[in-house]
Amino acid sequence: MKKRRLINTPSNEASSIPFISGIDEETHPLRHSPKNPLLTSSYHYELPNELIATHPVHPREHARLLVYNRCDQSIIHARFDALESFLPENCGIIFNDTKVIKARLYGNKESGGAIELLINRPHDAHNINVYIKGRVRTDTLLHFASGINARVVALHDDGSRDVNFYRENVLIRFEELLPLLDLIGHIPLPPYLGREDNAEDEREYQSVFAQHEGAVAAPTASLHFSDALFDAVCSKHPHAFVTLHVGSGTFKPVEAAVITDHPMHSEYYSVSDEADKLIQSDLPLLSIGTTSTRTVEFYVRNHKLQGEANLFLHPNNPPLRVNHLLTNFHLPQSTLLMLVASFVGLEETHRIYQEAIEQKYRFFSYGDAMLIL
């Protein structure tokens, strides 16, 4: 019998950008693990490769929508443009207005060797944390188009590197780099798409309400909103924006056997005054995406309007404030899947995902959506 392929995320090697590859079910070392919500192996599931969405749906609001009601554990299959008909009347909505930057750069070392660089996040105005595909050492100089250079200033055990960027040999700040990325950079598509970015991705791998540049991955639940649908939903519900600049750590696999041993990555966040008021209100909250959820929940726990968020939501650390979640379908054994389980529990997560697979929903960043009520 032909073996089916599974999607899994192996360990990152030093000097490499996080990637996805297939493994064989029979050799998977965790396949016999019991369904314990604290075991990483409990979040494994089998996904046929053909259900990975490699391109967006047109129009974007024609993606499918699985609606799960926790009150009676019912599942309804709908289309995303019917979202408003399922939302509770007195429900506040939190959106993440981060904007994806062209964070992937292709260039060469002084020796002539080709390299690929993925910006992760800035530490400060000049020191930028990146992943580099290709061997580099401290002080290695990297050359890109339009007179842009980067010098490696630090190597880290997690495989990331810190660099300083220059233009025409003049050190530049991160905010000065951003408009240059529009000229020489590429949309940082998730590695599991297995293809290069194109002009379509410049439009579609961005929410219609994106405002603040800094993300290197899209808050994917937001990608289903057209301008018209966004306006329609906002006209009927109190809403506000938070900003969480999604980093490449969102693709980092959980490698620890016990999920609570996983070192959660941190990302810059900011909570607007309007979002603060909505969070402090008595209204039930719907978060658009896992990034909005983590931002709200981190803020509820530490009461800081901006900073670094590294909250890991899972069944033993459930949400305190967010009542409803709109999200996509996520990678096996990922922190995002564990976040979903924090809302509905491990067993129901598996049941919902099995239903989505049987109904041939499209998975991951360009895939279909799920609404948890």
Image (cartoon, helix red, strand yellow):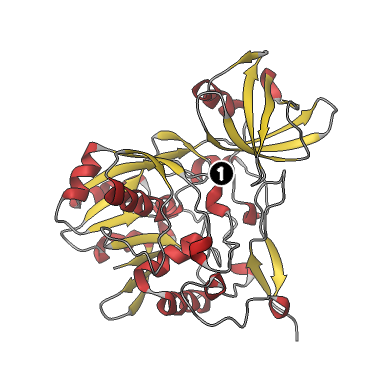
Q: Amino acid at mark 1?
A: Glu
Residue in view at x 48 percent, y 74 percent: 353
Is 133 left or right of 72, judged from the image as shown? right
Whether residue 372 is visible, yes or no, is yes
Residue in view at x 67 percent, y 50 percent: 195
Q: Mark 1: few, some, or many residues within 10 Å (few <14, many ≥20)? A: few
Q: In this picture, is 13 found above or below 72?
A: above
Q: In this picture, is 67 found above or below 26?
A: above
Whether residue 65 is visible, yes or no, is no
In the image, 137 versus 359, the foreground residue is 137
For label 1, the residue is 200
Q: Percent x, y for residue 101?
A: 52, 35
Q: In this picture, is 102 found above or below 178?
A: below
Q: Percent x, y for residue 117?
A: 67, 37
Image quadrant where one finds the C terminus: bottom left
Q: Quadrant of residue 49?
A: bottom right
Q: Quadrant of residue 188?
A: top right
